[in-house]
Image (cartoon, helix red, strand yellow):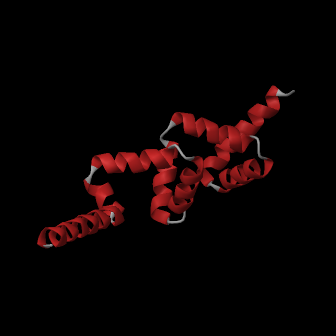
Amino acid sequence: MLKRFLAVVLVAACAGALGGCASDVSRQMTTNTETKTKVMDTIATNPEMASEMMDRMMASDTTRAVVVDKAMSNAVVVQALINRMARDQTTLDAMVNVAAQDSLMHGHLMAMMKSIDMMHR
């Protein structure tokens, strides 16, 4: 009877310990490289989860800046963004308006417009 009671207590203690570990994923992510890799790989390979993570990252000024900086430091991503923006008239208009309002970019923008005009004559 005592052995059975000790076995039940041991199983309960193990379940409690494992349950506690499972519920603290954030701690495991910061202390366990294998767990961090598994979680990040799961998110990165699941488009729905990746989209949700991007929404969360873009909701805060701090993490949004990280996303923008990372994107702008990757030439392939920058080219994809340029291509996407160039195909959207509203986005392109907004980009030109922002550039025209910037005193340093205004002259450059005007020179580009003259160059484009000359190419089409």
Badge count: 0
Q: Nearer the viewer, residue 54 or 49?
A: 49
Give residue 59's quadrant in the image.
bottom right
Q: Nearer the viewer, residue 93 or 78?
A: 78
Q: Is 114 drawn above or below residue 51 in the view shown?
A: above
Can you give x and y, in whole percent of width and height, for residue 12 in the image?
Answer: 25, 69
Q: Is residue 73 left or right of residue 32?
A: right
Q: Is residue 25 left or right of residue 102?
A: left
Residue at 44%, 44% in the rendered image: 41
Give residue 62's quadrant in the image.
bottom left
Q: Is residue 8 left or right of residue 63?
A: left
Residue at 13%, 68% in the rendered image: 3
Can you give x and y, in whole percent of width and height, for residue 14 in the image?
Answer: 23, 64
Residue 110 shows in this picture: no
Residue 51 shows in this picture: yes
Q: Is 94 drawn above or below residue 61 in the view shown?
A: above
Q: Nearer the viewer, residue 79 or 17?
A: 17
Can you give x and y, in whole percent of width and height, for residue 21 in the image?
Answer: 29, 63
